Amino acid sequence: MKLLMVNPNISENVSDLIATEARRAASKEVEIDVLTAPFGVAYIETRCEAAVGAYAVLTMLAEHYQGYDAVVIAAFGDPGLMAAKEMLPMPVVGLTEGALSSAASLGARFSIVAISRRIRAWYRETVEMHGLHGRLASIRCLEDAPGDIGGIQADKAEQLVALCNAAVQQDDADAIVIAGAPLAGLARSIAGRIPVPVVDGVASAVRHAETLAALATRPATLGSYAPPPQKDWKGLPLPLAKLIGRN
Amino acid sequence: MKLLMVNPNISENVSDLIATEARRAASKEVEIDVLTAPFGVAYIETRCEAAVGAYAVLTMLAEHYQGYDAVVIAAFGDPGLMAAKEMLPMPVVGLTEGALSSAASLGARFSIVAISRRIRAWYRETVEMHGLHGRLASIRCLEDAPGDIGGIQADKAEQLVALCNAAVQQDDADAIVIAGAPLAGLARSIAGRIPVPVVDGVASAVRHAETLAALATRPATLGSYAPPPQKDWKGLPLPLAKLIGRN
Amino acid sequence: MKLLMVNPNISENVSDLIATEARRAASKEVEIDVLTAPFGVAYIETRCEAAVGAYAVLTMLAEHYQGYDAVVIAAFGDPGLMAAKEMLPMPVVGLTEGALSSAASLGARFSIVAISRRIRAWYRETVEMHGLHGRLASIRCLEDAPGDIGGIQADKAEQLVALCNAAVQQDDADAIVIAGAPLAGLARSIAGRIPVPVVDGVASAVRHAETLAALATRPATLGSYAPPPQKDWKGLPLPLAKLIGRN
Amino acid sequence: MKLLMVNPNISENVSDLIATEARRAASKEVEIDVLTAPFGVAYIETRCEAAVGAYAVLTMLAEHYQGYDAVVIAAFGDPGLMAAKEMLPMPVVGLTEGALSSAASLGARFSIVAISRRIRAWYRETVEMHGLHGRLASIRCLEDAPGDIGGIQADKAEQLVALCNAAVQQDDADAIVIAGAPLAGLARSIAGRIPVPVVDGVASAVRHAETLAALATRPATLGSYAPPPQKDWKGLPLPLAKLIGRN
Amino acid sequence: MKLLMVNPNISENVSDLIATEARRAASKEVEIDVLTAPFGVAYIETRCEAAVGAYAVLTMLAEHYQGYDAVVIAAFGDPGLMAAKEMLPMPVVGLTEGALSSAASLGARFSIVAISRRIRAWYRETVEMHGLHGRLASIRCLEDAPGDIGGIQADKAEQLVALCNAAVQQDDADAIVIAGAPLAGLARSIAGRIPVPVVDGVASAVRHAETLAALATRPATLGSYAPPPQKDWKGLPLPLAKLIGRN
Amino acid sequence: MKLLMVNPNISENVSDLIATEARRAASKEVEIDVLTAPFGVAYIETRCEAAVGAYAVLTMLAEHYQGYDAVVIAAFGDPGLMAAKEMLPMPVVGLTEGALSSAASLGARFSIVAISRRIRAWYRETVEMHGLHGRLASIRCLEDAPGDIGGIQADKAEQLVALCNAAVQQDDADAIVIAGAPLAGLARSIAGRIPVPVVDGVASAVRHAETLAALATRPATLGSYAPPPQKDWKGLPLPLAKLIGRN
């Protein structure tokens, strides 16, 4: 099985974190490739940056999707997720989507722990997009703006543990989602210090993508996830134009 | 990895269907055992039968859970699911839970196709319990009461295909969940005749349980999925009393 | 009019509290019998214990319902309620159901005051089951695990009064529901110290059951509260098998 | 026990229907007085007429409430209900409120059968006001404008029965609410022809008011149902000014 | 363009505040008349007072609506709004309605800042009536009962600014609605001290009414905003009777 | 006042329709410029095309926003709307946003009439994004795929009128939104044939943008609509990089 992961951000060191956790989490027989966005910003906190990231995701996927069994969009917030699900003939999973799929089984209510105040609105709306806001206990976050995004989990581990425990004790979270690709892998290392299950978005998304690939359902040819009807286009990268434009 | 599946009904031929589809869907290294309820009814359609099934599930699990990495409650409607999640130290997945986890990734909205009119209220409430009713397009069902429950998918295949297609065309379902253990495996055989992904509850639950086991999160010791506080008890089967009573 | 109350717990002293408050609250002409569960735990705090209690409720009711005009399931959290409504030909009311019916008339929003932290998740889900979560202001609770469950209202009266007042002043509750059969009768004794109406689950459920019996509507023969379709069964107590199995 | 019922409409023949059904439904010891609105319209179908009816209700109640143990606002749609709950020191119940309290116990989902197309929006919003729209299966209605409002249940009985049965068979209603004071008493006479419980608003409201009076909770002095803070006023009927104005 | 504004309260000094802010906010070509309720209370805080105000609104509008292009009901809480929309052939806007229309464009979530604790329940229910409670971050309020209602914004400016900032910083409001006609104009004067947009109900409602008048859509003759079907009436002011009664 | 409208599609003839209706609807003093997307597809029906359109919108706006008082994103479905609200210091309005602002005042519930089946899912999700799905009566659509998108309103006028009337009569819509820039102006020409108000997205959005500009609220510097925190970037068009990247 071959899995393509796309990082909607331009940070190579975050792509490395993603790749490491993804390979640790995946079944042995899964081959994983990770692409980094050729344009965009260092990390996504806002709807504006997510719109840029979504377009980067679509252009990367259009060029590279062939030969893969499933795709993971490797940013919490799932930029371009529904668009990619329409566009591609194989399963596409986002980090939030994967994390919620795990968290919703491991707790009646779950909290999200995030890297900045600003990022919370976008995460809340992503949970709403997935229809699971009724089960969201809280979103807790670091207060300071992130400095070196690749080093954030080392720098802030104690604060992040404290946020997890506050979510359990004060917000009644039954499970914790550690959010954001820059925190990939943290869930494993702090699990022993939190009294409820701690969910990693990368690991969950990889495994959830494996499941969908293994189920081998056919792609939709009708309904809202069928490929976009082909129509006139202009100025698109050719691989993208081939998928959504009239040829 | 060892997976325990419990059929909350007394129908051995349904347990056989479950076992066959489960083994076909699981990863190669997964060992699967299927238990049939020692008491209860032939199949569950109502909240009343689900309450009986839930107790049967808890008694079976209390006696047999040890040594397994994950548990699947093998009836759509997930009788006893939240109770078992509290009681046991490993992941527990229900057929509805597993199916929704797949369907919510494969479509923006999904429909459930079921074996009887009566069963719909219970299924609707199960989807509400999981918090995903906002994404449910419809529940469509066979009209006649089921006869031989083990033979229903052979007897009613054409009607079930028609229900799936009606859900896509009239209810705007982007994915279809074939509901009920007696229909285990049908999704595979009819997939080619439905223009959207068709989800099997047994296959989805098995794979979702594998994912949760692989993620290896720790069991909750706080929150609402921690084990029930031990207290005085009376008249319970001993294995169950050991798990929830004061010893 | 004859009313059957079933305590889903094994605590005889709680049954005594229930009986005392029920007789004080009921109309003069109502005869009340209270049964205590023959198996189960001392009191119910979790979904797991509620599943055990639900089965105890169904077995008690199947054996004893005949000759009664209405039934009350005398635990907050309403274990087995929807199941019993299907199974029996007379009205069945739960303590939460009765309390919400009063509280929703006495306040735009209401809070629940409960005996333990752990019990809150189950209560919240019960309110959701009844569809009234939009009117729930908060659930407040005692922090310490209950000791002698029969003596809790005497031991903790001051703390419970403080919780009620906090719900009014901080959570904007217009009415307070004192939750849990072990607190039956407390609402009367503390009413003078709380600036909003205080609702007793036992008293409300008894009166609400009287109302439903007096309205004398016919039992459903169609829809999701009609009796479960009869089918093959195994290993059930005979009175229960007679109600839900094929004879 | 003394119960005051106010008809927000000017139709004396509807008041007679209300009084007849109320007395048939009430406990023997209950004395019932029914007042007809001194101003307004023949029957209420719209938000506009309901606003007029609400003011009529408040003026009637301010003048006459003293000496009663509970009040019923005897129009489906509950004009002025929340306002009266604030203003008066005893329980106040509306016909929709009472009917929903019964219907929500007798069915998982219920339908409302109404006398005109136009009236549906107001009823739907009333159910939403009570927070129970999640349990509303449908609102079905007569198509023709009502002629003689006092004679409508005799004239349209067959059509109303057909609407009830359609709600059960097509909308999955587990219980039916016959809506509107002009249909008071119809539920009893047609119950045998409908396969689920049929709820009468007048009978339910009377019994629910009895329950609230019997529970003898104290009136709110804090929260949103406490009496309106007294303030300067002008041009109000004196009894109303005494209750809500600065004296 | 001619705009009629009706103050549902009897406070002439509040009408003056409304008129001043309305004229400052309106397009140059708009003529504005402001009427003060001939009966009622000094300001509206409760559902009870709102019901009185709604009737005052309907009687004022019925007498004076002719010749105007649009109407504004100039109290936050929108007393009689839906009723007036049905009754009149031109657009009718409430202060809450107008404010929400602005706030929902200026922020993903918004908070309301209000003049008293008591008023919050009514405001919350008004936001629910408009269907926008999903975007309400919080309602914050002054703690003390208002003294001179006309002078409240001068007396309490500092406290109101602090409430706005608390809503932004603690409740995650992206925009603030200054609620209540007595605070008309305050938004302009404090805007520089709040880090998010501050919305004035009067200014928003006036501009929103202008928009609706300019769009020149036709009045409804079907549906729930069509005029109430004419019927027998009694005791109504003649202008009101002409609009809703059978002539 | 200067208004910038951006058409997220590449269809110049749709931009002409937009410009014509916008100038007809705007106040006299408003100057309007309309830009057409330099890349993308002929019209947007899917989430995938909307993601492309969103990026086109951001790049156009970043280059051209300076000197305008407000911005309208001129496609129903509002591609890039929330992103643009964050990015720019002036009000930004989408066609759906503007249309809902009008429709929610003109009807208790409204329907959307659209140009293709496929487009409905995207529109439904846009209404959900705005939080107004509770007031959506239905989305009705043309069945055939659109041919010449610029000529669709002439070609399909009769079918569109029939859809509007069906929404009123069968779905209980109190107002109709004609959706999609290719239908700009149609609302005016068919208004006389529909018994409820018919809302044009372009006209509503232009007027709503005028209102927001006139209110002259300050841009957010805190909260989720403040500008994105500046950070490292790569490969973005320079005007966009200036707005969201670290310089």
Image (spheres, coloured by chain):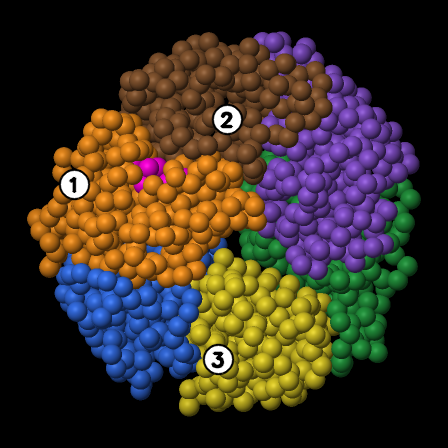
Chain colours: A orange, B brown, C purple, D green, E yellow, F blue
Write the start and end of the magenta stretch as one range. A199-206
The answer to whether dots 1 and 2 both sit on one chain is no
Residue A205 within the segment the image draws in magenta: yes
Q: Which chain hosts label 3? A: E
Residue wearing tag 2: B89
Please tell me whether residue F10 belongs to the stretch shown in magenta. Answer: no
x and y, in percent, of residue A193 in the image: 48, 40
Mark 2 secondary-structure assignment: loop
Q: Left of A245 or right of it: where is F27? A: right
Q: Which residue is mark 1?
A: A65
Q: Which residue is mark 3?
A: E193
Find residue D95 and report its horizontal and vertical position in percent: 71, 51
Q: Where does the image place residue A191, in percent across and percent down from the top left?
A: 44, 38
Q: Main secondary structure of the magenta part?
A: helix
Q: Is residue C27 left or right of residue A193?
A: right
Q: Residue at x 58, y 17 (%)?
A: B59
Instruction: Residue at 71%, 30% (x, y): give it.
Output: C43
Contact between marks 2 and 3 (CB within 8 A): the answer is no
Q: Nearer the viewer, mark 2 or mark 3?
A: 2
* Residue contact at pointers 1 and 2, CB within 8 angstroms: no
**In this picture, residue D107 sits left or right of residue C73:** left
Q: Amino acid at mark 2?
A: Pro
Given residues A226 and F129, the one toward you in this image is F129
Q: Residue at x 78, y 68 (%)?
A: D59
Q: Amino acid at mark 1?
A: Tyr
Q: Residues within 10 Å of mark 3 (few under 14, many from 20)?
A: few
Q: Is residue A191 above or below residue A121?
A: above
